[in-house]
Image: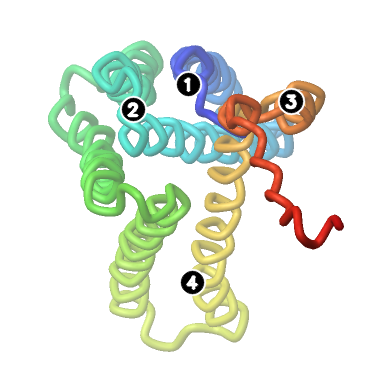
Amino acid sequence: MQKISPARLFYAALILWAALLLVSLGLGAALYSISGDVLKEGLYKALDFVSSLLSLAAFFALMAVLGISRYYDLITEKITAVCIAAALTPQISSTILVAIYQTDFADRIGYYLISIWTEIVFAAVIFLTVIIAAMLLRGRGVRKVFIAAMGIWLLLSLSQELITTVDFLYEIKDPTAGEIISIITSYIFPAVKAFLGYVLSCAVLELMTEKEPVSAAADRQAAPNPTEAAEPPAPKPKTDKKQRR
């Protein structure tokens, strides 16, 4: 027998919030400090890749925790509050870092805030999808909630790539072969990420599930059924006296 642990869900949400804070603020500060340094260009690219990967993985895991909580109706208010705070963390961290490291932040505050906070709309759509799907698909399997969320995430990602592609082709009328390959791969990567996000969500589900010890289940199966033990013994059939003679 299996059951979802509310404590594990809540602690997982807190851990993911801390992870997003560490990645967005810690690695973000490291990236800003070495940005523009030609000697550290390789380190910058490596840190940027790691930061993006960890942020996306934490977001997918957070989405899974929210979906599980809503699907099984477990401490939904607390976990939803933590998930919202965690979703806002990258934007808050980016705003702080831009204000510190960009000298023209005061003059172009509107531009920076719009470029930073537009991503929160993306996260809000995903979270709303998770909540609505968990309500509509309750009883049909929580993994279907993950599929719905990943589907919307993929649709939004491909829409962003399409806008970028149209803008790029508008500026460059005759792209090279390398640029065409880059455009094609930009549509493949979101699908791969969506699949890996689904796998990660299923892994989170397994981690949140408490499994009953095998020995306890075996003991319960081996124990006699009390209803059967309470039944009176069947009466013996009466024998005919003539037959005994």
Q: CA distance from mark 2 to mark 4?
A: 25 Å
Q: Position of residue 168 (x, y in %)?
A: 36, 72
Q: Is residue 75 visible?
A: yes
Please name the amino acid that badge 1 sits on.
Answer: Leu
Q: How many marks?
A: 4
Is residue 92 something that shows in the picture? no
Q: What crowding class fits label 1: few (fewer than 14 Cα within 10 Å), some (14-19), or many (20 or more)?
A: many
Q: Is residue 121 left or right of residue 217?
A: left
Q: Earlier in the sequence, mark 3 or mark 4?
A: 4
- Please indicate whether residue 126 sits to the left or right of residue 213 in the image: left
To which residue does mark 1 refer? Answer: 9
Q: Few, some or many C-alpha atoms within 10 Å of disc 4 (few <14, some 14-19, many ≥20)?
A: some
Q: Identify residue for label 3.
A: 223
What separation in Å lies between label 2 and label 1 (alpha carbons)?
Answer: 16 Å
In depth, the one of 4 and 80 nearer the eye is 4
CB contact under 8 Å: marks 2 and 1: no
Question: Which of the image's four quarters has the C terminus?
Answer: bottom right
Dividing the picture into quadrants, the one containing residue 232 is top right
Counting other residues with Cα less than 10 Å from the Cα at mark 3, is it few (<14), some (14-19), or many (20 or more)?
Answer: few
> Which amino acid type is marked by label 4?
Tyr
Tell me what residue is drawn at x 59 percent, y 25 percent: 230
**Residue at the image point whose x is 54% and y is 22% from the top:** 23
Question: Which residue corresponds to mark 4?
Answer: 187
The image shows residue 154, relative to residue 31, as above or below, that is below
Q: Earlier in the sequence, mark 1 or mark 3?
A: 1
Secondary structure under tag 3 reads: loop
